[in-house]
Amino acid sequence: MAGLSDVFLEEGRLCYLMYTVSEWLHNNENTELSARAVLAPSADELFIVIGDKENHRYGISNRLIRNTSHRLEVALAPNATETERNHAFGFDLSCLTSLRVCKQVCQFVPQVWSDYLGRLAKEGQVITPQEECNP
């Protein structure tokens, strides 16, 4: 398990914060699970981080890369609500210390995963079998 945090201050004020949790599964594919939360300085920066043009405060990206890396990322603009901030930085690392190991990235940030599924449903989309979360 690895944790990484980047904090940038400008004139004594927080202008950028990134928190990442990664875990390597030593299975047949050596899969990496990665969850990242970013507090971006502006809505434009949120788009750069996530690529989500529709959501100007709270953008979510779910990516499966070469079937070996599953990344769930959320980016917040400064005008994000308290609930959105709580969801984004509400990491649950209990699977790292329990007998039931972390098997899927959705276990790290369950509220973000729930928000992601809600957005897909609202847009009439469904998740692919590779994206399903059944820990």
Image (cartoon, rainbow, N blue to C red):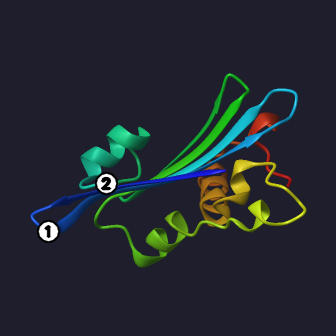
Q: In the displayed structure, does residue 86 sit left or right of residue 69?
A: left
* Label 1: how many Cα within 10 Å (few below 14, some 14–19, many 20+): few
Q: Nearer the viewer, residue 120 or 67?
A: 67
Q: Residue at x 70, y 49 (%)?
A: 105
Q: Residue at x 34, y 42 (%)?
A: 47
| Relative to 60, residue 115 above or below | below
* Label 2: how many Cα within 10 Å (few below 14, some 14–19, many 20+): many
Whichever of labels 2 and 1 marks the residue nearer the N terminus, that label is: 1
Whether residue 52 is visible here, answered yes or no, is no
Residue 34 in the image: state x and y as whole percent. Answer: 61, 45
- Amino acid type, residue under disc 2 in the picture: Ala
Q: In the displayed structure, does residue 127 sit left or right of residue 91?
A: right
Q: How many marks?
A: 2
Q: Nearer the viewer, residue 42 or 37?
A: 37
Residue 93 in the image: state x and y as whole percent. Answer: 68, 65
Q: Residue at x 79, y 54 (%)?
A: 102
In three-dimensional space, the C-alpha distance between marks 2 and 1, rounded to whole angstroms, equals: 16 Å
Whether residue 77 is visible here, answered yes or no, is yes
Circle 1 residue: 12
Q: What number is the disc on residue 40?
A: 2
Task: For the C terminus, give its image quadrant.
Answer: bottom right
Using the rendered view, name the quadrant where residue 38 is placed: bottom left
Q: Residue at x 72, y 28 (%)?
A: 68
* Mark 2 or 1, closer to the camera: 1
Label 1 residue SS: loop
| Relative to 100, residue 131 above or below | above
- Amino acid type, residue under disc 1 in the picture: Gly
